Image (cartoon, rainbow, N blue to C red):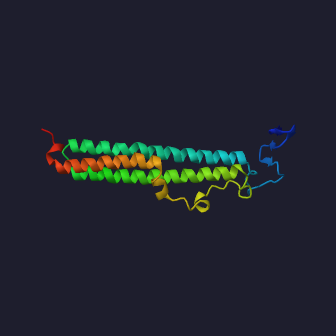
Amino acid sequence: MLDRGRRVNGVASERQWSGPVNRILLLPTGKRASIGGMSDYDRVKHLELISRAIERMDKGAQGMKALSPGALGVALVLLDRHVPAWLALSAAAIAVLIYWYLDAAYLGRERSFRALYEMVRKGELDDRPYFMEIGKLFAGKGIWKCMLSTVTLCIHGSILLLVAAAFVALSLFPGASHGP
């Protein structure tokens, strides 16, 4: 069955034939990229795969942002249960640092996938179909740079400041954590 793609100036720019075994996609440039025994290269499908990867990285980053305040909450509950302040607050600070690092790692990968998306959208990777290895293409984007981005710095940095303030307050007033 012949399925005509979008039309440019009244002429079909893409033609597809979907049979039971394979799929052929003729690009407007006349090029066909094939992958061994797989079906021919479909740029739209490649963009969908990259979009899903971007969504997964975003969800991971949001999860790390949600866990960071939870670490402070757990420290406050531990203080209420008479756990030593230095132990509860140190554990919270370590947890926040780990969540901050993981959040930055997700953010860096998300940015890399967004750059890969733009390259595929512009047709710069038609000779490398379904290319998804962002590590080789974008090795220069560092996690430390992402850790200092505005959002991650504000969220995780402010929670670390609260942990530090609680540590100082409980050091100056040692009996304050146990109540009357």
Residue 1 to residue 93: above or below: above
Could you tell me if residue 145 is visible in this image?
Answer: yes
Instruction: Give 86 or 32, whichever is nearer the viewer.
Output: 86
Instruction: Give 51 or 163, whichever is nearer the viewer.
Output: 163
The number of numbered discs placed on residues in the rendered structure image is: 0
Residue 179 to residue 129: above or below: above
Instruction: Determine the residue positioned at 59% across, 51% down.
Output: 113
Could you tell me if residue 84 is visible in this image?
Answer: no
Is 116 on the left or on the right of 162, as rendered? right
Is 125 on the left or on the right of 50, as rendered? right
Q: Quadrant of the N terminus?
A: top right
Instruction: Determine the residue positioned at 48% across, 46% down.
Output: 60
Instruction: Determine the residue positioned at 65% across, 50% down.
Output: 117
Q: Quadrant of the C terminus?
A: top left
Farthest left residue? 180
In percent of width and height, residue 159 lies at 35, 46
In percent of width and height, residue 37 lies at 74, 55
Instruction: Determine the residue positioned at 33% across, 46% down.
Output: 71
In percent of width and height, residue 27 lies at 80, 49
Is 58 on the left or on the right of 6, as rendered? left
